[in-house]
Image: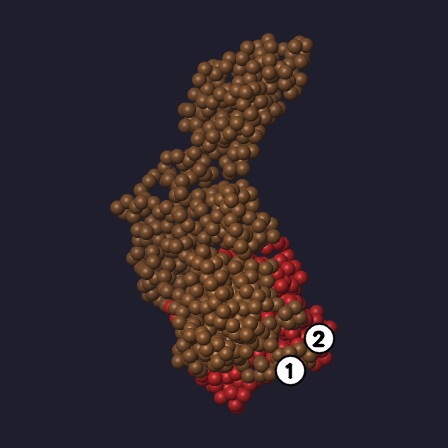
Chain colours: A red, B brown
């Protein structure tokens, strides 16, 4: 088995364990490269079906191209799609124009997710985080419990070995299931190439720039690049020494921003 | 760590899809793990641009010296406390291949993180501090590596700069640690004198230590082998689920070992139902014919037999062991100690079953390897023990040295994984011509047979009938027997005057007819309860031989093991004890028809057991009774338990 085959097999295994362990499960979907790979792996895990809803937490600062991709893919894959906006925060005027990125991300992503969780009573969330994205995420488990306040106790995590996971939780708690934990950015692209998985156009170079990671438009910037195909992106990643989230302003806003966001329940 | 996946240096490799070698770095806290890892990144140019500069700047801002360890310990708290809290998995690469590094922490209370990291490692670097020498943690981690099956090990003796690069010091440490690891069957490939901080023997030779002729750390790593394919081992598929999302009935699971092809005959354990693989259903790979070890698979069967999550599929030949009793070596990670006699949910593959700790044979202090002699009552956090288990229902498993994936398990403590273990010494059943053993298991569709109940409870139902004078010690013995059996996982229940005469027999008095009727009812209830699978301990004076014989006959007719136990104490002794003051009342004429006073007692002619309670100590009486009960309930016939069942 090649490296990609191994990653795929483990992710499928995790999907199936999660689906068995949790009655009410959903998969947040950002339409980005990682979550499109997740959709693909889910179809492999469940014989071409996706037996749970997908959740798009809409910050209202999405790139129009991403919304267009969302609507196309939802139809193409026959997704059970739920779109969630934190209307209350928008009504209060929370936005990038007036607030700092950390606050906006917290209100429009984390709190919106909490609202959706309360509405649908999910006890498992399948997310697309990867260990290599950030040093905080490096410490994650495949099955990562969250308390009722969505907090992640990264200082005292349950043991996880031999493919046995934390699946028992108390009322109000939920578990984040992270099938892509072992994948690196280049693995994602090589898998997209191997399987011909559709991804938004914004990852590909236009006028000498491309997006390597996608978030809200006010705080997401393209990086200089001439990679206009998946193969060229892979080639670029082989030689780059810039980190993936270099174009994500929220990460640089203050030291340890990511850690604060994660501990509060951000992806 | 941001981008430390080594995206950067992937250009060094022609094939990015090369298999990674997963290594874990373990050892005592402060022996320099993070520094070594930081150094490996730095020296293999596996860091993104700006990372080192960013850390240097951060250090300046904090007024601290730059350390290679900071490349790893990215969490603010960790930098403050100067320790690594959890396992991080990051990648670097050499000219030969890519590596995944699992940085395991050294603090004692973080052992569960070390296990979490090290359990998936292909190889390990054990780090010891040249100055501090072999510490408790160095020993503990060495022990756990052997338990987790990590066989490829190098020992890096770090901080050689602090001992003046002394060859003597290095060789003394090597002797001491080699001897210790030898006891655990861990044979390190190399001992390497290192200074991670100054970069000695990380990538190449060191001018400071010309006396060392062996490889540097990276060369030693490159010499390790990738994990061997398990495709040529016997087939094991752990069933995760059965899906019916469309017209197909798909069995989903993972091939843990061996390979599965369309047309293969497969047996599902522990039910041992057979069928044939009709098709593989792999979305995106139509017409796939074969799945091999490590792959997640999905398939349909020719015959729609009952298959469910938790079962293990094998070929008819070379199946797993099926049983309820097995021995294992276990490590415990939870605050609450593991207790002998207690039950824990056990997970092995996708099976989950309640497992009772029958005996803790011996406990080993994983830090010193000191063995506590004899049986123990508990296993405390971070200890290792040899334990005998009994599961409530039969499960399928392997010895770990035969098939790793189905030879290890975890136990839950509450909601969390409390510990893990590896199974050894199980006996594989002899196979008949067709592969699967042809003994009659008594599994029938629809009807729950006595055989099936026996398998479920792990013992037969039975009736122990204690007869004897009031005050002879029946009740005390009965309740102590009930407790003792229950502790062994045998469902036991006492029927006595108290719980019968308040309900079922509340309409009866103490005339001869009523007494006979009372015994008849007790006998019928005891028989029913025993048929349901319980061991019923009846404690009644039951003075009439004929009535007792009727109950014996009733049980035998129903195939229920029956034992009459004569609790024999002389009347004088009973009357002297008079625990309830009944003799006194009877002598005073307040209780008519009192056995031994104005109503006869007919002793058993041939009891299965006679206990002279006036002469025996209570312990000896209980032991004799317990032995009788065990013999009576032994699950014999139809099932041979590996390792000798209860």
Depicted B461 relative to depicted B365: above or below? above
Q: Count residues near mark 1 (Cα–Cα under 10 Å), then give few for <14, some for 14-19, many for 20+.
A: some
Q: Is residue B577 visible?
A: yes
Residue beneath the point at 54% across and 37% down: B487
B420 vs A260: above or below: above
Instruction: Give the answer, above or below, for where B150 lies relative to B427.
Output: below
Q: Nearer the viewer, mark 2 or mark 1?
A: 1
Kindly state the secondary structure of the residue where label 2 is placed: loop
Question: Can you say which quadrant of the picture contains the C terminus of chain B?
Answer: top left
Please state the horizontal and vertical placement of residue B154, each as a whole percent of the image.
Answer: 45, 67
Residue B57: numbered disc: 1
To which residue does mark 2 refer?
A94
- Foreground: B161 or B82? B161
On the image, which quarter does residue B482 sit in? top right
Q: Quadrant of the N terminus of chain B?
A: bottom right
Q: Residue at x 39, y 47 (%)?
A: B426
Tell which residue pokes out farthest to the bottom in this image.
Answer: A207
Tell me, yes or no, if residue A174 can be seen here: no
């Amino acid at each position: 088995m090649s490296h990609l085959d191994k990653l795929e097999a483990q992710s499928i295994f995790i999907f199936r364990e999660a689906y068995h362990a949790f009655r009410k499960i959903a998969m947040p979907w950002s339409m980005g490269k990682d979550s499109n790979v997740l959709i693909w792996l889910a179809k492999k895990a469940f014989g071409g079906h996706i037996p749970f809803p997908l959740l798009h937490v809409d910050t209202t600062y999405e790139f129009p191209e991403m919304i267009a991709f969302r609507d196309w893919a939802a139809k193409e894959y026959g997704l059970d799609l739920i779109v969630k906006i934190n209307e209350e925060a928008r009504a209060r005027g929370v936005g990038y124009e007036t607030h700092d990125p950390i606050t906006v991300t917290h209100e429009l992503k984390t709190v919106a997710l909490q609202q959706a969780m309360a509405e649908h009573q999910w006890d498992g969330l399948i997310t697309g985080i990867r260990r290599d994205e950030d040093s905080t995420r490096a410490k994650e488990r495949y099955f990562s419990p969250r308390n009722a306040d969505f907090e992640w106790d990264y200082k005292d995590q349950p043991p996880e070995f031999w493919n046995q996971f934390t699946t028992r939780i108390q009322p109000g708690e939920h578990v984040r299931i992270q099938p892509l934990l072992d994948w690196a950015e280049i693995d994602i692209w090589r898998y997209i190439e191997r399987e011909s998985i559709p991804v938004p156009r914004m990852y590909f170079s236009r006028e000498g720039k491309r997006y390597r990671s996608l978030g809200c438009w006010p705080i997401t910037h393209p990086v200089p690049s001439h990679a206009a195909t998946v193969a060229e992106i892979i080639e670029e990643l082989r030689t780059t020494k810039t980190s993936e989230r270099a174009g994500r302003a929220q990460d640089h806003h203050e030291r340890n921003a990511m850690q604060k966001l994660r501990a509060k329940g951000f992806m | 760590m941001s981008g430390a996946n080594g995206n950067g240096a992937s250009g060094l490799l022609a094939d990015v899809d090369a298999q990674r070698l997963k290594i874990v770095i373990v050892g005592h806290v402060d022996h320099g793990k993070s520094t070594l890892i930081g150094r490996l990144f730095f020296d293999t140019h596996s860091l993104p641009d700006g990372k080192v500069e960013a850390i240097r700047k951060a250090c300046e801002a904090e007024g601290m010296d730059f350390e290679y360890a900071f490349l790893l310990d990215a969490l603010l708290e960790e930098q403050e406390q100067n320790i690594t809290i959890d396992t991080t998995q990051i990648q670097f690469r050499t000219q030969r291949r890519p590596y995944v590094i699992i940085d395991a922490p050294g603090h004692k209370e973080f052992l569960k993180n070390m296990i979490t990291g090290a359990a998936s490692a292909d190889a390990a670097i054990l780090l010891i501090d040249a100055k501090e020498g072999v510490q408790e943690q160095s020993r503990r981690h060495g022990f756990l590596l052997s338990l987790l099956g990590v066989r490829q090990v190098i020992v890096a003796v770090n901080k050689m700069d602090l001992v003046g690069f002394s060859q003597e010091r290095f060789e003394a440490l090597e002797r001491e640690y080699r001897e210790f690891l030898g006891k655990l069957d861990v044979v390190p490939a190399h001992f390497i004198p290192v200074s991670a901080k100054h970069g000695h023997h990380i990538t190449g030779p060191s001018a400071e230590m010309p006396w060392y002729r062996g490889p540097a750390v990276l060369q030693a790593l490159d010499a390790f082998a990738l994990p061997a394919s398990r495709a040529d081992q016997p087939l094991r598929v752990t069933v995760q689920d059965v899906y019916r999302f469309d017209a197909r009935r798909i069995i989903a699971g993972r091939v843990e070992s061996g390979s599965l092809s369309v047309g293969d005959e497969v047996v599902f354990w522990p039910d041992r139902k057979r069928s044939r693989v009709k098709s593989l259903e792999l979305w995106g790979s139509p017409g796939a014919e074969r799945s091999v070890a490590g792959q997640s698979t999905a398939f349909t069967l020719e015959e729609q037999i009952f298959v469910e999550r938790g079962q293990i599929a094998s070929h008819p030949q070379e199946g797993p062991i099926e049983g309820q009793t097995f021995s294992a070596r276990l490590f415990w990670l939870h605050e609450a100690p593991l207790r002998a006699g207690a039950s824990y949910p056990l997970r092995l593959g996708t099976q989950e079953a309640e497992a009772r700790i029958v005996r803790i044979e011996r406990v080993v202090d994983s830090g010193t390897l000191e063995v506590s002699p004899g049986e123990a009552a508990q296993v405390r956090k971070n200890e290792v023990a040899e334990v005998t288990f009994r599961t409530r229902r039969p499960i399928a498993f392997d010895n770990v040295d035969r098939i790793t994936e189905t030879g290890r398990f975890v136990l839950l403590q509450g909601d969390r994984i409390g510990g893990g273990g590896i199974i050894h010494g199980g006996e594989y059943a002899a196979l008949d011509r067709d592969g699967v053993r042809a003994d009659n298991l008594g599994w029938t569709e629809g009807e729950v047979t006595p055989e099936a109940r026996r398998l479920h409870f792990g013992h037969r139902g039975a009736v122990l009938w204690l007869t004897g004078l009031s005050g002879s010690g029946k009740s005390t013995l009965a309740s102590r027997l009930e407790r003792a059996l229950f502790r062994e996982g045998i469902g036991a229940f006492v029927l006595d005057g108290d719980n019968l005469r308040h309900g079922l027999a509340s309409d009866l008095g103490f005339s001869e007819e009523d007494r006979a009727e009372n015994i008849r009812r007790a006998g019928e209830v005891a028989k029913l309860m025993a048929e349901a699978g319980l061991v019923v301990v009846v404690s009644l004076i039951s003075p009439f031989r004929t009535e007792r014989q009727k109950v014996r006959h009733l049980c035998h007719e129903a195939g229920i093991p029956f034992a009459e136990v004569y609790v024999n104490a002389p009347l004088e002794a009973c009357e002297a004890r008079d625990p309830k003051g009944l003799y006194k009342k009877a002598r005073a004429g307040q209780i008519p028809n009192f056995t031994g006073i104005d109503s006869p007692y007919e002793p058993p002619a041939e009891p299965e057991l006679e206990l002279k309670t006036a002469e025996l100590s209570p312990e000896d009486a209980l032991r004799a009774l317990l032995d009788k009960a065990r013999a009576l309930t032994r699950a014999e016939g139809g099932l041979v338990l590996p390792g000798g069942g209860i």
